Amino acid sequence: MSPVDPSPNLSLVSEPLSSSEEATAPISDSEKARSPEPKRRPLARTVPWVLLLVFLGLSVLLWQQFQRAEGLVTQVDSLKTSLLESERRLEIYVRRLDTVRMSVGDLAERVGDLKVLVEADPLQSASIPSAEPLEAAPRGED
């Protein structure tokens, strides 16, 4: 037989329990039913607010991105207009440059012809074929 413990562990209800005793103390079914779990209630209240704040934040960011996109579209349109104007001016400049090149080419050819005439010996000018003589147009007798 086992010896009986002469000092039973009896405590008063009004004594405060230490934290280690609270953790090991059994909870009755009636106490479980009476005490609501406070940890779930605050979480259930904060989740919709957090989601609402996230939604509002994302809405503000989306609005800012749309504003930026509209600004960029306006800038692209302005740049396209500027590019078309620049292309038009460049085309005019190229045409003018081609005209100048043709004029310079004609002038260089004339200068070359004049250089040949200047360097030519005047005594040999008779041997150089000159421009064909103009034929006199026959005059009709009236």
Image (spheres, grey):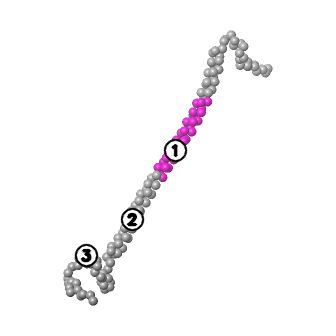
In the rendered view, tell whether residue 138 sits above or below residue 32.
Answer: above
Kindly give the residue lying farthest to the bottom in the view shown.
1
Q: Residues within 10 Å of mark 2 (few under 14, many from 20)?
A: few
* Point 71% across, 17% down: residue: 130
* Point 31% across, 76% down: residue: 38
Residue to which mark 3 is pinned: 19
Where disc 2 sits, the SS reads: helix
61 lies left or right of 20: right
Does residue 34 appear in the picture of this structure? no
Marks 1 and 3 sit apart, C-alpha to C-alpha, by 79 Å
Rendered location of residue 20, percent (x, y): 26, 76
* Point 35% across, 72% down: residue: 43
139 lies left or right of 34: right
Does the magenta run of residues contain 97? yes
What amino acid is labelled 2 in the image? Val
Q: Name the one closer to the observer, 24 or 110.
A: 24
Highlighted range, magenta: 73-102
Residue to which mark 1 is pinned: 83
Where disc 1 sits, the SS reads: helix
Residue to which mark 2 is pinned: 54
CB-based contact (under 8 Å), mark 2 and mark 3:
no
What amino acid is labelled 3 in the image? Ser
In the rendered view, tell whether residue 84 sits above or below residue 19.
Answer: above
